[in-house]
Structure formats: structure tokens, C-alpha cells
Amino acid sequence: MTEEEEKHDPELQILEGTCMRLMEHFDSVRIFVTKHDARAQETSQMTVGRGNLFAQLGQVDVWRVRQDEIVRDGLRKED
């Protein structure tokens, strides 16, 4: 998507607006979204963020580790 197309993309505008509103209350924000298009049989993704990029990346890393541990804990309980 070109920069000009992004300016007129209503979904991207929703994400940008939401991100800016959240930034009024938080130090950093990263929003990930996906959308399935049944006709094209594909899933697209978008992400927007503001604030400290390293804080955003660190938060994603912590979330992934926690999610992995939840799965591992569930498997341990099954054994």
C-alpha cells in the first residue's frame, strides 16, 4: 500500500486514531489486528504503534514468553 493509499484507508485511520487516543494515557502503544477476507481466502494484518519502540518490542517478547508458558503448563497438566 502506498503512502497516499494509507492516508485514505478507513481501517488504518481507525487504528491510527485509536493509537493516538491510547497514547494520551500510556507511554507506548502497539496495536496488532488481522482481518480475514473470505472471498480472497486470505488474512491480512496491520499494526500501528507510538512511543518507545524498544518498550513495544519488549512487551511483545514478554507476552510471547507468557503465552508459550501457558501452553507448556497446560501440556504438563495433561501428562
Image (cartoon, rainbow, N blue to C red):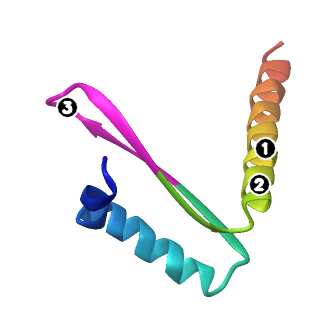
Q: Amino acid at mark 1?
A: Asp
Q: Is residue 39 magenta?
A: yes
Q: Kindly identify which numbered label has been placed on residue 59.
A: 2
Q: Residue 25: x and y, percent? A: 65, 85
Residue in the foreground of this view, choosing between 66 and 1 = 1
User: Which residues fall within the magenta stretch?
Assistant: 32-46
Residue under label 1, please give it.
61
Secondary structure, mark 2, is: helix
Q: Are marks 1 and 2 in contact (CB under 8 Å)?
A: yes
Q: Is residue 59 above or below residue 65?
A: below
Q: CA distance from mark 2 to mark 3?
A: 32 Å
At 81% from the left and 25% from the top, the residue drawn is 72
Q: CA distance from mark 1 to mark 3?
A: 31 Å
Residue 12 is drawn in which quadrant? bottom left
Drawn side of residue 28 relative to residue 44, left or right: right
Secondary structure, mark 1, is: helix
Residue under label 3, please give it.
38
Return the disc, 1 or 3, that comes first in the chain's sequence.
Answer: 3
At 43% from the left and 70% from the top, the residue drawn is 16
Q: Amino acid at mark 3?
A: Ala
At 57% from the left and 78% from the top, the residue drawn is 22
Near mark 2 (Cα within 10 A), the count class, few <14, some 14-19 or many ≥20, is some
